[in-house]
Amino acid sequence: MQGQATQDFYQQESANRRQSILLVILLTAVLAAFGFVIGYAISGTWQGGIVALLIAVLISMLLSSLSYFSGDSLVLSVSHAREVDSTSAPQLMNVVQELSIAANLPMPRVYVIDDPAPNAFATGRDPRHASICVTAGLLQKMDREELQGVIGHEMSHVRNLDTRFLLLVATLVGSIALLADFFLRFTFWGGMSGRRGRDNDSGGGGGALVLIMFVVGLILAIVAPIIGALVQMAVSRQREYLADASSVELTRNPYGLERALANIASDREPLAVANRATQHLYIVNPLKKFGSKSAGLMETHPPIVDRINRLRALTGEAPLDPQAAAGLAGLD
Amino acid sequence: MSPTVLIVLIVIVVIVIGGILIYNGLVQRRLRIREAYAQIEVQLKRRWDLIPNLVNAVKGYMGFEQSVLTSVTQARANAVAAGGQGPAQQASAENALTGTLRSLFAVVENYPDLKSNQNVLNLQEQLTTTENQIGFARQHYNATVLDYNTGIATFPSVLIAGPLGFHAEQFFDAEPEAQQVPTVDLSNLSGPTAPPSIPPTVPPSVPPATPPAAG
């Protein structure tokens, strides 16, 4: 158990470094292409295209830097998380401290979301700039052992840089959606003022720009959900299995995490602050879709029954019996 | 310069560089052990400091259980004394202290006033987390020792480790008797501070550090 999980761990860590860089390069390439097309269309010259391309590359680098350095603050504020300390949440801070020692990592910042649905996520570009967030529901409904298992899972995500890659995914997907929004709004402005009967001469040139912006916005609006879906496929569910195994490696106790997963999954309340951009960050899918088969390719999380069975296999126990499995099946 | 001489020179250079890399690697691993040990000591010291507060908090209520309190205080004194004597001695004294604390908390369960006393609850949580942190610090320490001991035992490091003064380090072990789960009946407990059920088996591939104690 220990050897294989450790090997996978280091492999995943290198993969995360690689994939983070590749993601940024991909985004830059896509935006550069868009920029060139827009520039060429507006100016009608190659040079114009190149200038627009350079601007687009600049924008992309700005977006990537913002995502990398401030993405965690963004995710935390979008999730309405508030920071806690050892006065406001002593047991939680203690548990996080314990796992930091076990993982030999600096203590991350700890946040709480005031929502009764139990869940947790971690974010941050590396262990020195990490944050772990749990919901108030998790604190209420889990005992100390289960909380340890969940925090161990999150610390593992921090340790092997899953949080870096998943953070870039969350913010870049989000920013494409924002860009689409921006371009579409631009069209409506431009379109509206055009309709107020402006002079035909200025209207002519302005009209072409507006049309282009509209088309770009439309493309982005179509492309964003596709990219979102592609990203969901790329966000390998292996990460969750590995984080589960790493958690057990840290705590030397699979029972806490096992019970925690079962309890979180069977709690039917959806998490209010979660959305498509942040859903893959959580330990259990917060957008509950009851009855759907979570073994599908498009799912961000593996099925709970599989995760629990793998944990049981670690200590040589039998998998869940069919009755218990049926109770949890379809919940992710 | 003839080819033979050149080749011999290259081989010598490779060996020397290899030797330097191995040496540096072993030194780093050994330093990690020291660092991990220091972490354990920090946690142990924290526990030593918490215990007098706990004893004072419960003393007034537990007039009839003096023997338990005395054994905790005595075990603490022994642990402090064993402080400078190396991992094996220290582990043994600290394990004894853990045992007395478990007995103390088991007894506290019989006093409803104490059980709901906020002061005692806070101290209990502090001690629980300190126990866990000791356990995890020890786990990490044993991992660094394992890494180092493996490093000096494998080829080719094994060739130069001994002559250069690298010797195997001791694990911070639990004594065989301390691995026995104490038979304390806590079945009527509930709530977030209930102790976990201690797993029946310890995976054999794991260095024999005890799992986190009660709580």
Image (tube, rainbow, N blue to C red):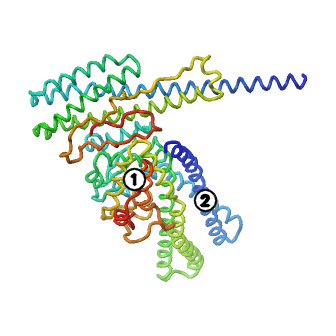
What separation in Å lies between label 1 and label 2 (alpha carbons)? 26 Å
* Residue B68 picture quarter: top left
Q: Secondary structure at mark 2?
A: helix
Identify the residue at the far right of this view.
B2
Decide: few, some or many residues near mark 2? Use Cα within 10 Å; few <14, some 14-19, many ≥20: few
- The residue identified by callout 1 is A121
Q: Earlier in the sequence, mark 1 or mark 2?
A: 2
- Three-letter code, disc 1: Phe
Residue A43, x across and y down, in percent: 66, 70
Q: Please give left or right for residue A85 compared with residue A124 in the image.
A: left
Quadrant of the rendering where the C terminus of chain A is positioned: bottom left
Q: Chain of mark 1?
A: A
Q: Please give left or right for residue A299 compared with residue A58 in the image.
A: left
Q: Please give left or right for residue B192 compared with residue B60 in the image.
A: right
Residue A298, x across and y down, in percent: 50, 67
B159, B61: nearer the viewer? B159
For image coordinates 82% across by 23% down, the residue present is B8
A73, A17: nearer the viewer? A17
- The residue identified by callout 2 is A26
Task: Look at the picture and state if A200 lies above or below A41.
Answer: below
A148, A128: nearer the viewer? A148
Q: Secondary structure at mark 1?
A: strand
Decide: few, some or many residues near mark 1? Use Cα within 10 Å; few <14, some 14-19, many ≥20: many
For residue A85, which numbered disc appears in the image? none
Task: Look at the picture and state if B142 lies above or below A232.
Answer: above
- Three-letter code, disc 2: Leu
Could you tell me if the residues under marks 1 and 2 are in contact, i.e. CB atoms within 8 Å? Answer: no
Task: Look at the picture and state if B174 lies above or below A83.
Answer: above
